[in-house]
Image (cartoon, helix red, strand yellow):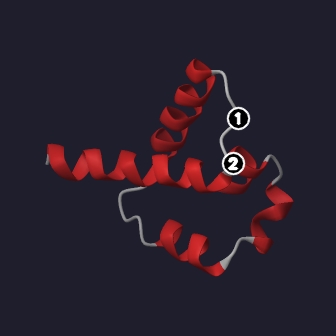
């Protein structure tokens, strides 16, 4: 999902840098809804997000859930 939304091509998933992949896989509460929220933010801002920024926003989405619990 990250490769499709952040990189624009699911085929690029295998080339993700290890630190980025590790950060993605350690987000225990990460859901499809988090991806949808980040995509909405990207559309509202009407700007492209670098993969690192997309990941940062995903992590932030997961943190919001931790704070709300």
Q: Report whether residue 15 is seen.
A: yes
Q: Find residue 29 and report its horizontal and vertical position in percent.
A: 36, 57
Of discs 1 and 2, which sits in the foreground? 1
Residue located 65% across and 41% down the image: 49
Residue located 70% across and 35% down the image: 48
Q: Find residue 6 and report its horizontal and vertical position in percent.
A: 69, 48
Residue at the far left in the pictured view: 69
Q: Which residue is mark 2?
A: 6
12 vs 19, left or right, is right
Q: Find residue 50 and report its horizontal and vertical position in percent.
A: 68, 48
Residue located 76% across and 65% down the image: 13
Image position of 12 with respect to 63: above or below? below
| Disc 1 element | loop
Q: Find residue 15 and report its horizontal and vertical position in percent.
A: 79, 73
4 vs 37, left or right, is right
Q: Which residue is mark 1?
A: 48
| Disc 2 element | helix
- Which numbered disc, 1 or 2, marks the residue that appears first in the sequence? 2
Q: Gap between marks 1 and 2, in whole Å?
A: 9 Å
Q: Nearer the viewer, residue 58 or 69?
A: 58
57 vs 65, left or right, is right
């Amino acid at each position: 999902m990250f490769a499709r939304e952040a990189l624009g091509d699911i085929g690029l998933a295998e080339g993700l840098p290890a630190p980025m992949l590790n950060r993605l896989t350690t987000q225990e509460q990460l859901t499809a809804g988090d991806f949808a929220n980040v995509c909405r933010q990207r559309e509202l801002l009407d700007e492209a997000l670098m993969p690192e920024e997309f990941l940062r926003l995903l992590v932030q989405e997961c943190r919001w859930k931790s704070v709300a619990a």
